[in-house]
């Protein structure tokens, strides 16, 4: 069995953060990322990078964190009792990008590694992550290219990997209280260690590297499109769903808050402006209604390519 190499994971994640920030800042052309290095009182820290009020990106954050401690919060050990009495380390890059133009989708990506150790015993470890896309106005070409990039990232690791992790993404990024998906999906995986450390780490890298290659061409294609106040108003309304999911369901957000993580970095995923309305529904036959009928439902996008 291959050895767990925490240093190699950390090196990759820091380089990934650098690359994504460099490419997004170049695509924006009007703003750069501001870095905020921080330390966690219980052990570890990270570097948060935020872009705001750019030519393209209204706000976005790309966060690296490496936190550790002598014990996990009760919420973690209740679900995984084998972790009780173990020290832990959690490393990851997590990002959410909120463009200003409603015709450019919001995107999210996360890749992470967790290991819990106890003297005299084998470490318990796993990788997790994925990426997903949240359009406000749907373009089928964008959805197809996004999922094609996801499949290419998965293909070297098994012919069924994309299908399984696409389904997991559809199931995970679902607002049960709204009975609707958050977006058009992508990939999601967690607790993954069955392939051994080296292969699973390679898969995590493949997913991490695929994100910017999938997202940047969509931004480039859509950022110059003209939009109206109606488009903008609907974008702010739909951003409310993003807030609801992250605060109610997201595992990374909940773990970060419960384990004493840095609140500013954890909540960087929230959009700067958002609206809620009571019992609002789009006008039948409108562009806004088409988002619900044609895009916010599970689809086999690659079968339609």
Image: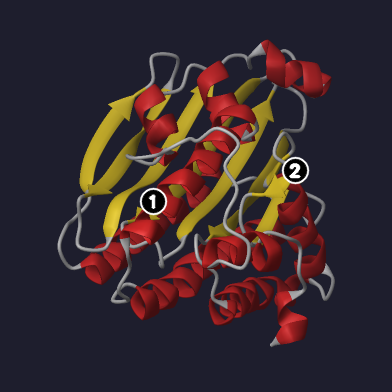
- Position of residue 98 measured from the top left corner of the image (x, y, whole percent): 38, 52
Q: Name the residue: 62% across, 14% down.
A: 71
Q: Are marks 1 and 2 in contact (CB under 8 Å)?
A: no
Q: For residue 270, which quarter of the picture? A: top left
The label on residue 233 is 1
Q: For residue 154, which quarter of the picture? A: bottom right
Query: Which residue occupies the foreground of this view, 152 or 118?
Result: 152
Confirm whether residue 202 shows in the render.
no
Q: Helix, strand or loop at disc 1?
A: helix
User: Sequence order check: which comes first, mark 1 or mark 2?
Assistant: 2
- Position of residue 66 measured from the top left corner of the image (x, y, whole percent): 45, 34
Q: Residue furthest bottom?
A: 305
- Position of residue 84 measured from the top left corner of the image (x, y, whole percent): 75, 15
The label on residue 56 is none
Q: Residue furthest left?
A: 30
Query: Which residue occupies the foreground of this view, 152 or 125?
Result: 152
Above or below residue 189? Residue 191 is above
- Position of residue 196 measured from the top left corner of the image (x, y, whole percent): 76, 54
Q: Helix, strand or loop at disc 2?
A: loop
Confirm whether residue 66 shows in the render.
yes
The label on residue 179 is 2
């Amino acid at each position: 069995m291959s050895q767990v190499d925490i240093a190699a994971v950390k090196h990759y994640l820091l380089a990934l953060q650098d690359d994504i920030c460099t490419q997004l800042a170049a695509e924006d052309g009007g703003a750069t990322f501001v870095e905020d290095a921080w330390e966690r009182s219980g052990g570890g820290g990270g570097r948060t990078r935020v872009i705001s009020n750019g030519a393209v990106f209204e706000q976005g954050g790309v966060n690296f964190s490496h936190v550790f401690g002598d014990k996990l919060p009760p919420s973690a050990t209740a679900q995984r009792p084998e972790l009780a009495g173990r020290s832990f380390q959690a490393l990851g890059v997590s990002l959410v990008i909120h463009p200003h133009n409603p015709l450019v989708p919001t995107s999210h990506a996360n890749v992470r590694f967790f290991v819990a150790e106890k003297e005299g015993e084998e470490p318990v470890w796993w990788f997790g992550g994925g990426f997903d896309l949240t359009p406000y106005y749907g373009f089928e070409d964008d959805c197809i290219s996004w999922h094609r990039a996801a499949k290419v990232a998965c293909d070297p690791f098994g012919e069924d990997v994309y299908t399984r992790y696409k389904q997991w993404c559809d199931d995970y990024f679902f607002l049960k209280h709204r009975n609707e998906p958050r977006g058009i999906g992508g990939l999601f995986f967690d607790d993954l260690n069955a392939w051994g450390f080296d292969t699973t780490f390679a898969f995590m890298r493949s997913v991490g590297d695929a994100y910017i290659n999938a997202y940047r061409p969509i931004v480039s294609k859509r950022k110059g499109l003209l939009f109206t106040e109606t488009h903008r108003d609907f974008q702010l309304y739909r951003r409310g769903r993003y807030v609801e999911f992250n605060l109610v369901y997201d595992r990374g957000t909940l773990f970060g808050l419960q384990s004493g993580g840095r609140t500013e970095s954890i909540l960087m995923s929230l959009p700067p402006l958002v609206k809620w309305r009571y019992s609002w529904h789009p006008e039948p036959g409108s562009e806004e209604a088409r988002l619900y009928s044609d895009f916010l439902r599970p689809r086999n996008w690659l079968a339609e390519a």
